[in-house]
Image (cartoon, grey):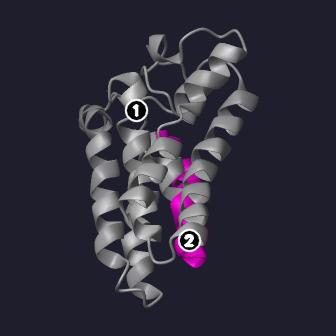
Amino acid sequence: MMLALLLGYLLGSIPFGLLLTRFAGKGDIREIGSGNIGATNVLRSGSKGLAGATLVLDALKATAAVLIARALWPGSEAFAAAGALLGHLYPVWLKFRGGKGVATFLGLLIPLLWPAALVYALVWLAALLIFRISSVGGMTAAISAPVSAAVFGRQDLFPMMLGFTLLVLWRHHGNIARLRAGKEPRIGRRSG
């Protein structure tokens, strides 16, 4: 179980947003916009392609962690999932300053409960289209995960999903403060 947690953490802690923008000559993504390493901030670098790749890779690293753990240590998938999310949120390589976990949460749902992953993606997209605020989309999607676990009859996953949701919401505490103050940037507008 500890090996699965460690595997998940190591895969989850790969900072794809930072790596992709550096390799593309965009510099250190932590020095622009929100300073975050996730897809939304990568989008602020001016590259939709890099932002899309960051989103996909941040999701797939969690999917990979769960699938590898399932193959090597059956029954350890939850530990790999937890490690992947924690690795993304608190990567040792970046002094424990990682992303917000929205794409990574989606990625771990795919092998654990794919219908919940589908609901998550649809909720995320719908909230983005309605509100045009990335953090609202991400937080709303995260909230859908434990609800989906309950609706789809996976009460065994509910506590873990609830914990993951609380972690993602915690990582959005700055966004929540800006939302309350009416200062959270909308998609398509530059933020400082």
Q: Residue at x 70, y 9 (%)?
A: 25
Q: Secondary structure at mark 1?
A: loop
Q: Position of residue 102 (x, y in %)?
A: 47, 49
Up/down of 170 relative to 66, above or below: above
Q: Quadrant of residue 67?
A: bottom right
Q: Position of residue 86 (x, y in %)?
A: 36, 47
* Residue type at the position of mark 2: Arg
- Magenta range is 107-134
Report the residue marked by disc 2.
70
Q: Quadrant of residue 44?
A: top right
Up/down of 177 relative to 35, above or below: below
Q: Is residue 139 visible?
A: no
Dot 1 surroundings within 10 Å: few (below 14), some, or many (20 or more)? many
Left or right of 127, for residue 23: right
Judging depth in this view, the residue of 160 and 33 nearest the camera is 160
131 part of magenta stretch: yes
Task: Name the mark nearer the viewer: 2 or 1.
Answer: 2
Q: Position of residue 27 (x, y in %)?
A: 60, 8
* Residue type at the position of mark 1: Gly
Q: Is residue 158 visible?
A: yes
